[in-house]
């Protein structure tokens, strides 16, 4: 068994800050149709990057340890919903000296622009990173017009 050490105040403050951030990250879906029960039921929120390319919007979400079959993606009324679950690695805490990796359900929502093509969304999971590709509608892609002289 590990010896008990004196608590480091900065470590406690960092943990408190992470806990507060986790609460606020879970609230981002409340204003866009999520019910409070859906939001507060989330145990954690994956970190997400969203970028715009010429022909698509791309979302990358860090979901290490999450089986792709445990991830749900829905698109409705211009809102992309990402939810799922990271299952605990062990059912009992015996022989563990520290458990820091969060398990449980996650929930994120993103409002997409009108240019998103909801019918052509694709997703894949590679090495713990979920990539969601949302193509832009053909009719709204920028078009270069040649000026005649």
Image: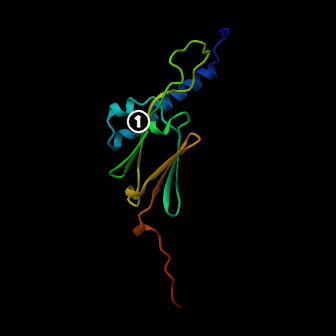
Q: Residue at x 62, y 22 (%)?
A: 11
Q: Which residue is mark 1?
A: 27
User: Looking at this rendering, what residue extends furthest in the front direction?
Assistant: 69
- Is 118 situated left or right of 124 in this image? left
Q: Which of the two residues, 126 or 103, is positioned nearer the viewer here?
A: 126
Q: Quadrant of residue 81?
A: top left
Crowd band around label 1 with a 10 angstrom C-alpha radius: few (<14), some (14–19), many (20+):
some
* Residue 133 coordinates in the image, percent (x, y): 48, 53
Q: Which of the two residues, 103 or 44, is positioned nearer the viewer here?
A: 103
Q: Residue at x 50, y 36 (%)?
A: 67
Q: Residue at x 49, y 80 (%)?
A: 145
- Is 93 situated left or right of 118 in this image? right
- Is 96 situated left or right of 112 in this image? right
Q: Is residue 60 above or below residue 120?
A: above
The colour scheme applied to this rendered structure is: rainbow
Q: Quadrant of residue 64?
A: top right
Q: Is residue 86 above or below residue 11?
A: below
* Residue 39 coordinates in the image, percent (x, y): 38, 33
Q: Is residue 147 above or below residue 64?
A: below
**The N terminus, quarter of image:** top right
């Amino acid at each position: 068994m590990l010896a008990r050490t004196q608590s480091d105040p900065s470590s406690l403050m960092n943990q408190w800050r992470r806990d507060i951030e986790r609460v606020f990250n879970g609230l981002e879906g409340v204003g866009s149709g999520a019910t409070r029960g859906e939001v507060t039921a989330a145990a954690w929120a994956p970190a997400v990057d969203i970028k715009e390319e010429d022909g698509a919007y791309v979302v990358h979400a860090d979901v290490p340890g999450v089986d792709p079959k445990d991830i749900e993606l829905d698109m409705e009324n211009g809102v992309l919903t990402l939810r799922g679950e990271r299952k605990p690695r062990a059912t009992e805490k015996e022989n563990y000296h520290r458990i820091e990796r969060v398990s449980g359900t996650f929930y994120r929502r993103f409002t997409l622009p009108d240019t998103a093509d909801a019918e052509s969304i694709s997703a894949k999971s590679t090495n713990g990173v979920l990539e969601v590709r949302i193509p832009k509608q053909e009719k709204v892609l920028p078009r270069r017009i040649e000026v005649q002289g």
